[in-house]
Amino acid sequence: MAKIVIALGGNALQSKNSAPTAEGQLEVVKNTCERIADISAVGHEIAVVHGNGPQVGRILLASEAAKDVTPAMPFDVCGAMSQGYIGYHIQQALKYSLNTRNISYPVLTVATQVVVDKNDQGFQNPTKPIGPFYTEEEAKALVAEKGYTVKEDAGRGWRRVVASPIPQKIVEIDAVKQLWETSIVITCGGGGIPVVENSDGTLEGVAAVIDKDFAAELLAENLDADVLMILTEVEKVAINWGKENQQNLDHMNLKEAVQYIDEKQFAPGSMLPKVEACMKFVRANPTKKAIITSLDKAVDALNGKTGTVITFA
């Protein structure tokens, strides 16, 4: 059996048909955890990383809206809040799904800090979408009113974007390694709480959202995982996406991936970071593999029946 780090995309936490509420999220998470439990049930060891773009955006909006009643929370604190409540939902739903399969593994969330470089270029060029989707008119109004940076998000609408620095180090990794042996750990939630290291060794939170796919990749390297699995909305990675000549990919090696990126086949803030995270993993671990597929096809993908497999060669 394999050691697998699973990165959950936004659709694994909320769907287009569910209300953007805690209750709506929990209903979606219950279905997600059925799929994760299926993976665990066949004997794989797993750790779970999740995104937080919509959630941290809403927490920030709520905090800003209530600033006249109670002080607004800093961005890193909003990230920590999202990490806690999303992890709680996954813990609750996954533990139930495991119990129905007579699996008694503990499931727990680790509040995880991730070190980034304070000089990372991501701070100069915000790219990470957070919060809800807006029309172009609404987005431009937010720029004028609040000074947000907004970008069009892969044809789905406009969203606020924030800095997305590359993760350098997982602060709590030693604890996660110890827990890995006996538990299913939910860690690096939302990409981790972004912090920088000061000259005196202290850590300081910064306003950013680390891409959860890159955080999952770093975790997979640190845990010596066999597979990095990124679960998203589509069953396979495609080139010429949305065109008549769209081609779904069963396999992609590093050379091919570089070519497709040069051709701008993958949308920034959407499929591109997923592919780049997978490339980084197999580059560091040439005998291992990464998989990109949909949540519902996760087990089939692990069995080689679907998904896009990324390998070194």
Image (tube, grey):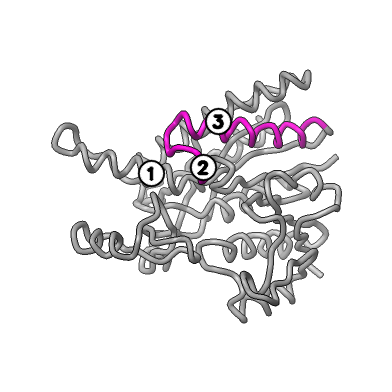
In the displayed structure, 2 sits above or below 230; it is above
* Residue beneath disc 1: 202
Residue 251 percent location from the top left of the image:
79, 65
Q: Which residue is mark 3?
A: 27
- Identity of the residue drawn at 47% across and 42% down: 113
The residue mark sitting in front, 2 or 1, is 2
* Residue 72 sits in quarter: top left
Q: Is residue 29 magenta?
A: yes
Residue 137 as seen in the image, left or right of residue 311: left
Q: Specify the quadrant of the image occupied by residue 299.
A: top right
Q: Is residue 162 visible?
A: no
First to last magenta residue range: 15-41
Q: Position of residue 278 (x, y in %)?
A: 68, 60
Q: Amino acid at mark 1?
A: Thr
Q: Residue 165 placed where, x, y %?
A: 45, 59
Q: Residues within 10 Å of mark 3 (few under 14, many from 20)?
A: some
Q: Nearer the viewer, mark 1 or mark 3?
A: 3
Q: Secondary structure at mark 2?
A: loop
Name the N-terminal-most of marks 2 and 1.
Answer: 2
Residue 260 versus residue 111 in the image, above or below? below
Question: Residue 3 vs residue 161: left or right?
Answer: right
Label 1 crowd (10 A; few <14 / some 14-19 / many >=20): few
**Left or right: 198 with respect to 18?**
left
**Point 78% across, 18% down: residue:** 102
Label 3 SS: helix
| Image x and y of residue 307, in percent | 76, 56
Which residue is identified by label 2?
A: 17
The answer to whether residue 281 is magenta is no
* Residue 183 circle label: none
Residue type, label 3: Glu
- Name the N-terminal-most of marks 2 and 3: 2
Residue at image location 39% in from the left, 50% down from the top: 132
